Amino acid sequence: MRKRLLETRGVLLVVGFEVLSGCSSSSNPPESHTSASTGSSGKSGIIAGGSAGTNSGTAGPAAGKSGSSGASGMAGSTGSSAGSTAPHDGGSCLGASQLAKLGKTRLVVGAARPQSTAEMAAVASTPLDLEYVYISGGIFDGPTPCTACDVTCSVGKQTCDQGCGWWGCYNTPPGMYAGYFLQGSAQASPAQIPMFTYYELLQTVNNDLGGSNEGSAEVMAATNVSIMTSYFADWRFLLQQVGQSVAVLHIEPDFWGYAQQVGSDPTMTAAAVATANTKDCGSLPNTIAGMGQCMVSMVRTYAPNALVALHASAWAAGADASLNTDTTFDVAANAQKVAAFLRGAGGADADLVIVETSDRDAGYYQVEQNKNTFWDTTNATLPNFHQDFAWVKALTEALGVPAMYWQNPLGNANQTNTANHWKDNRVDYFFANMDELAAAHVIGAAFGAGDGSQTTPGTDGGNFATKAQAYVTSGGQALCP
């Protein structure tokens, strides 16, 4: 699996950027990220919160987790998947209506919120479409959000008067972290689409139960009524901050992949839903299927202009389609298994599905783990870009919703394969082949480091900023033929 990163600025194919969060890839779930700002490190890769009591509008830390790992996925493209649902789309192609809701007619590009002055300077003049942050670090102790960030509010028994992990107390009054981010996105020139990656369950479970609970233990913890009561209350609180704003809401990277590995039918794996959130989801089943359906339906109630997405992990069905080297592997069948699980968990009722390439630069894996995660840019040998795009195309057609790439690595061939200067080829290939993303029903791509040691827009020699600027200036890539 992958590690998640914390907050930074992200780039999306509608141009955007991600907050730093670390992920690791493997045939299993992603590794955790280390926090780029305050924080905690570890399997979950979340960043601890900023200090409470500041009303300055500076964003608190974010943590993230993205990353898929695994083994499978193979060449050969795939056409429409069997049994695919009708496009969730009022436009002329899959994803057109979603782009229109974001105010765009071309693929968007984005990035994680910058974590340093160097990163801010690197993208200051780049007209990114989207910026993303992590919502992570753990949830308040108790069934309802705190009304003040003082000794009456705590996270994992740590009171928030001195700073705590709950995003709601990164700024005061509670919730203004999201409010300031929304304001900043609206005031940017040009205005940016705000994206929230909600990665709270793992940190919350770790705080409540102790130790590391990533994977099946995290999925099993979703049956805990006390944990899930707080969890749904926090999700509601975030959605209430978003309100009528146009935004993208990305729900729980890795979690759905872990859940699929626990059981391929989300209606058969238990979770506390109606028992934990009678207010919003009292009629939904107490299953993983009900959990996803509940979270999507709450967006419609509290943040009706937002686009919501579950996360699709390329390793969820067993083999990692993003790293597959077997030419006989059935890419479409693998993607359809992931789509079937997500469909049952509310993914077909969402607006998008979030996908990713890798949680870390390929040069990092090559040097630090003696592992080849580079994709062949000639698409002659596996793994390669065409294989991944074929997987995404099959996934989106089976779900009936378009995809967005998130937390793409920022390395390039001119780097030195040292800390913060790792080689990779995703930025260069994506910007040179946006038409291939459009053909896979991808509406945008966001770029961000998967952990604090990875390449960033501030350390990549200006490669990302230059290419994003050129992409936007040229008019970008249309989604529909």
Image (cartoon, helix red, strand yellow):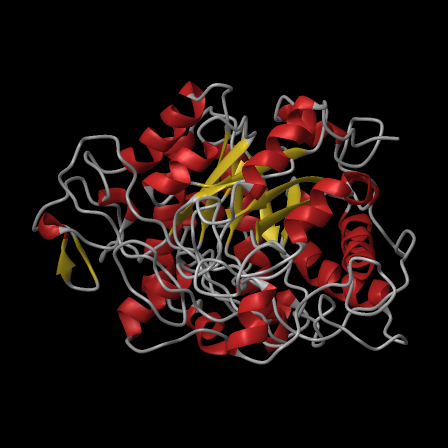
Q: Residue furthest bottom?
A: 370
Residue at 28% across / 69% down in the picture? 208
Residue 404 coordinates in the image, percent (x, y): 65, 44
Q: For the image shown, how many numbered marks are present on the structure?
A: 0
Picture quadrant of residue 97: top right
Picture quadrant of residue 442: top right
Quarter containing the C terminus = top right
Residue 143 coordinates in the image, percent (x, y): 27, 53
Quarter containing the N terminus = bottom right
Between 345 and 471, the one lying in front of the other is 471
Between 439 and 86, the one lying in front of the other is 439
Residue 455 coordinates in the image, percent (x, y): 49, 55
Report whether 24 appears left or right of 154.
Answer: right
Picture quadrant of residue 107: top right
Between 229 and 165, the one lying in front of the other is 165
Residue 163 coordinates in the image, percent (x, y): 15, 51
Residue at 81% across / 39% down in the picture? 435
Q: Is 365 above or below relative to 139? A: below
Q: Is 118 above or below relative to 409? A: above
Residue at 53% across / 62% down in the picture? 416
Residue at 83% across / 30% down in the picture? 480
Report whether 201 appears left or right of 68.
Answer: left
Any part of residue 145 in sight:
yes
Any part of residue 1 in sight:
no
Report whether 271 appears left or right of 262.
Answer: left
